[in-house]
Image (tube, rainbow, N blue to C red):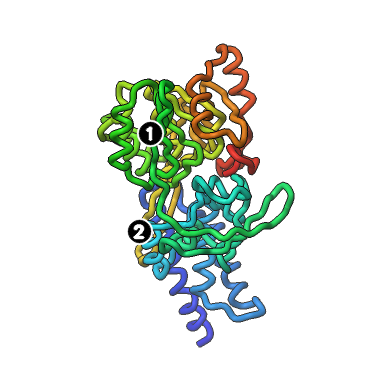
């Protein structure tokens, strides 16, 4: 009888685990998990159920294994159990969010950039430890998204950590809609389009001002770090018109997406201002503009832009995986590899936006030899999963 009960205890969780494994491996050409690895998993599984000090339900152990396997694939990857799928999908369409662009690997959440106009103590590269009473260390990336998003106007106390000083601080933030683009006239010097959140639509008045603008246009993509590449495709169509997205490369080869839109920047002299807070989908937009011949000015970008997909599983859950890296204008994957502006520019802190934009429009390109040397010095090492090693603006994953 004991043997029968033991076999029953194993059969249910292993059927679920095998079903997920088979589904995930079906479209791949890579070999299935070898028997030795499966045997090791079975042994550990049995020891946890038999020898751990507190009783464990087999389903809970399998759930932990699935979450661990998914998160080990790389940053922002996760297994989403069936019961968490509705909350995840609701978060993706929530009208408001805490004003932060956060990424997540196996540690605490990491601040890529705050929205414009937030508390000055928030700095790119700071760790986000708590969202309310929820520790981000214990959350998957989808759970972080769920914790960030909600109703417009809700206030949430968050605790951050300045990693170099190992000093915690708290900030109360208010959930808000994505910051809309705005246009600033620079008089005879031209104008500037500030685009911090790709989630936002182009306001009609901003589009009208942009179309009527005379002189050069500066597109400010600093702090633009949305995580949805499809938003980048939409904005490339809005700015450039009909064409193709930057290429992305994964197991299925190199893929481009068709883009289309009004092409509000077509025929204009344009420069793009970027820095270490220009990341993820913001870098996809940057790569697309640079490939169209538009000059980049500023400092190296964040250096990590992936194409993520949600795969439905037979048990009703989802598997969020990064399936491709976008390619920088130099053809290298944006995998710990920042986009280097053709015109390096470091702006002074406290500079008024209008003056910063004028400096970016007036900055002169360095000599060819200086550009190549500067680009070489700016490249940095990467971790085994493709994220940058350092955790400061432009180098933090």
Dot label at residue 4: none
Q: Is residue 302 shown above or below 110?
A: above
Q: Residue furthest bottom?
A: 1
| Foreground of the two, 273 or 260 | 273
Q: Residue furthest right?
A: 165
Q: Position of residue 251 (x, y in %)?
A: 41, 40
Mark yes or no: residue 172 visible.
Answer: yes
* Residue 359 position within the rendered picture, expressed as x and y whole percent measured from the top left: 53, 24
Rendered view: 5 above or below 151: below
Residue, disc 2: 312
**Sequence order check: which comes first, mark 2 or mark 1?**
1
Q: Is residue 207 left or right of residue 4?
A: left
Label 2, secondary structure: give it: strand
Question: Residue 269's image quarter?
Answer: top left
Q: Residues within 10 Å of mark 2 (few under 14, many from 20)?
A: some
Residue 6 position within the rendered picture, expressed as x and y whole percent measured from the top left: 51, 80
What x and y, as percent, mark residue 164? Answer: 72, 47
Are the residues at dot 2 and dot 1 in contact (C-beta closer than 8 Å)? Answer: no
Horizontal side of residue 308 vs 119, given as left or right: left
Q: Is residue 29 visible?
A: no
Taking the spot 54% from the left edge, 34% from the top edge, the residue there is 352
- Where disc 1 sits, the SS reads strand
Alpha carbons under labels 2 and 1: distance apart: 23 Å
| Residue drawn 63% across the image and 56% down it | 160
Q: Which residue is mark 1?
A: 254
Q: Quadrant of residue 347?
A: top right
Give the left or right position of residue 106, taking residue 212 as reference. Answer: right
């Amino acid at each position: 009888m004991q043997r029968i009960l033991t076999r029953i205890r194993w059969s249910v969780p292993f059927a679920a685990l095998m079903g997920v494994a088979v589904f995930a491996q079906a479209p791949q050409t890579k070999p299935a998990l070898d028997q030795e690895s499966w045997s090791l998993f079975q042994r550990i599984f049995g020891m946890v159920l038999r020898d751990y000090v507190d009783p464990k339900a087999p389903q809970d152990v399998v759930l932990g294994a699935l979450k661990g396997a998914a998160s080990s694939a790389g940053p922002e990857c996760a297994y989403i159990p069936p019961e968490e799928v509705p909350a995840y999908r609701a978060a993706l369409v929530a009208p408001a969010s805490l004003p932060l662009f956060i990424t997540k690997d196996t540690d605490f959440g990491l601040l890529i950039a705050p929205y414009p106009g937030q508390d000055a103590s928030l700095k790119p590269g700071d760790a986000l430890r708590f969202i309310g009473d929820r520790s981000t260390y214990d959350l998957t990336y989808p759970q972080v998204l769920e914790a960030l998003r909600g109703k417009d106007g809700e206030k949430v106390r968050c605790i951050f950590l300045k990693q170099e000083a190992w000093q915690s601080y708290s900030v109360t933030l208010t959930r808000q809609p994505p910051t809309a683009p705005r246009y600033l006239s620079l008089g005879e010097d031209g104008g500037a389009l500030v685009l911090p959140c790709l989630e936002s639509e182009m306001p009609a008045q901003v589009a009208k001002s942009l179309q009527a603008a005379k002189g050069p246009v500066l597109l400010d993509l600093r702090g633009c770090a949305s995580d949805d590449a499809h938003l980048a495709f939409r904005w490339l169509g809005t700015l450039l018109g009909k064409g193709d997205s930057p290429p992305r490369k994964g197991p299925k080869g190199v893929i481009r997406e068709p883009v289309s839109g009004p092409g509000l920047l077509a025929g204009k002299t344009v420069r793009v201002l970027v820095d270490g807070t220009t990341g993820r989908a913001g870098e996809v937009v940057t790569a697309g503009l640079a490939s169209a011949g538009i000059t980049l000015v500023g400092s190296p970008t964040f250096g990590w832009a992936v194409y993520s997909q949600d795969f439905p599983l037979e048990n009703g859950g989802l598997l969020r995986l990064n399936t491709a890296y976008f390619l920088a204008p130099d053809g290298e994957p944006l995998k710990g590899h920042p986009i280097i502006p053709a015109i390096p520019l470091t702006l002074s802190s406290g500079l008024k936006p209008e003056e910063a934009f004028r400096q970016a429009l007036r900055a002169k390109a360095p000599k060819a030899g200086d550009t190549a040397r500067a680009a070489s010095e700016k490249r940095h090492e990467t971790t085994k999963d493709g994220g940058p090693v350092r955790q400061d603006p432009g180098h933090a994953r």
